Amino acid sequence: MLPFAEIPTPNIDRLAREGVLFTDAYVTAPICVASRMGLLSGQYQQRFGIYDNIYGQERVRLFLGQTLLPALFQRAGYRTALVGKWHLNGNKRMQYETGSPLQRGFDEFVAIRGGDSSFWKGTPVFRGEKQFPAPEYLTDYWGSEACAFIDRNRSQPFFLYLAFNAVHSPMHALEADRDRFPNVADENRRTYDGMLLAMDRSIGRVLKRLDQHAIADNTIVLFLNDNGGGGSTTRYALHSRNFANNKPLRGHKFDILEGGVRVPMILRWPGQVPAAKVYRKLVSSMDVYPTLVRAADLPMPEDQQVDGVDLVPFINGQHDGNPHEWLCWQNRSWLPRKKGGFVVPTEKVHNSAIRKGNWKLVRLNEKIDSADRPPAWQVYDLRTDIGEQKDVAAEQAGIVKDLEAHFEAWRASMHPTVE
């Protein structure tokens, strides 16, 4: 999909050839849970007080009132399924604080509950409330389950949320897949490459199944990351590293820099959106919700704010403007320190950003509940500095003032952080 990629991804590349590739697509958060909440609700998850990954019932009481995307399809008679990673329940050892997938719009699911899991055959997974050992390498198994779901439902409308946990840590790749990269000297990177290769293989199986059942022309396929790659940084615990290479973007998962929130996104809908189109305007994972709902001619929920927009009229030129004039981010993080060889979180901070046009305003490590003066805003011109290397705030005082006003108005309209 990218000309500098070292990993062959023929099936993801096929989606790009047959659909629309978005160059400036963003998620609502640089971390798993918050990002998935934004995706499935069509909103900034800050509207219900979520600024980081969540653990505990009180943290999600506002989220429980949201109508998620699969629920709309379920009400309309679609068969709905989750295959892969749920991770809206805290972690794999906790009960469903956010409700089981069966309570949030899915008719069926086979999944891991938490955010990370072994990938090896025998890994515990859930089908409903029944736990059992995965019969094959997990990424391959998600592909098998997705294909089986398509087989069972090929003659009726369906909604499939295929949420791969690759390429999340722990780093587990089949030896045959690692062997495809003999020229990659770094062992960690070779494992990463093998894991991504396996995900692309499963995507290819799904696309082939749609072709075999002659339903590809009547099926929307959307590919999207939930956050940027984890990189190899030692700022965070080992389980958060996946040795991704986000270059030329700066930053990784957890960062509101481009490497944390700017992601690959592709939409294929034969006959309805152009093939091999590159779309360069600002889009968001929040747009998936209204885009799919409108495509299916379903009603949007009347009692729920939706921040996303239907992308199809913009892609097809029916709307000449921008899907979003600006996008905002704010996530809660922690200033880390090393203790006994481990990196541990200490002081809570907010990281904030807004992008408007090609300008991006960034504030890092603003201490929460502190009287300290907040750090200065940084400004980057993404047109010439996609790597966010040159802060031009000193020369762009007007841009700082304009974007800060937009950001503060947005922040005032969100719900405070829920503890």
Image: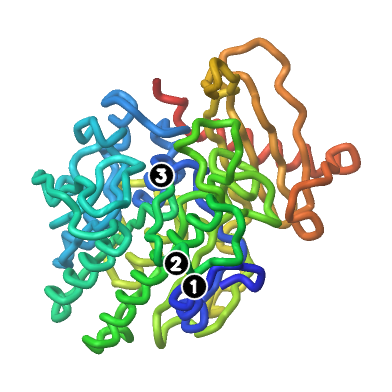
Residue that carries the numbered disc 1 in the rendered image:
9
Q: Residue furthest right?
A: 395
Circles 3 and 2, Cβ within 8 Å, touching? The answer is no
Query: Which numbered disc flags the more N-terminal residue, 2 or 1?
Result: 1
Compared with residue 196, is residue 272 higher up or lower down, i.e. above or below? below
- Residue 47 image point, x, y percent: 43, 37
Residue that carries the numbered disc 2 in the rendered image:
197
Q: CA distance from mark 3 to mark 2?
A: 16 Å
Residue that carries the numbered disc 3 in the rendered image:
170
Colour convention of the picture: rainbow
Residue 302 in view in this figure: no
Q: CA distance from mark 2 to mark 1?
A: 7 Å
- Residue 219 image point, x, y percent: 31, 78
SS under mark 1: loop
Compared with residue 246, is residue 218 higher up or lower down, i.e. above or below? below
SS under mark 3: loop
Image quarter (top left, top right, bottom left or bottom right) of the C terminus: top left
Image quarter (top left, top right, bottom left or bottom right) of the N terminus: bottom right
Residue at image location 20% in from the left, 70% down from the top = 158
Q: CA distance from mark 1 to mark 3?
A: 21 Å
Circles 2 and 1, Cβ within 8 Å, touching? The answer is yes
The image quarter containing residue 96 is top left
Residue density around tag 3, few if under 14, some if 14–19, many if 20 or more, within 10 Å: some
Q: Left or right: 257 with respect to 175?
A: right
Q: Amino acid at mark 1?
A: Thr
Residue at image location 62% in from the left, 19% down from the top = 367
Q: Nearer the viewer, residue 195 or 54?
A: 195
Query: Which numbered disc flags the more N-terminal residue, 3 or 2?
Result: 3
Residue at image location 65% in from the left, 73% down from the top = 3
Residue density around tag 2, few if under 14, some if 14–19, many if 20 or more, within 10 Å: many
Q: Nearer the viewer, residue 81 or 304?
A: 81
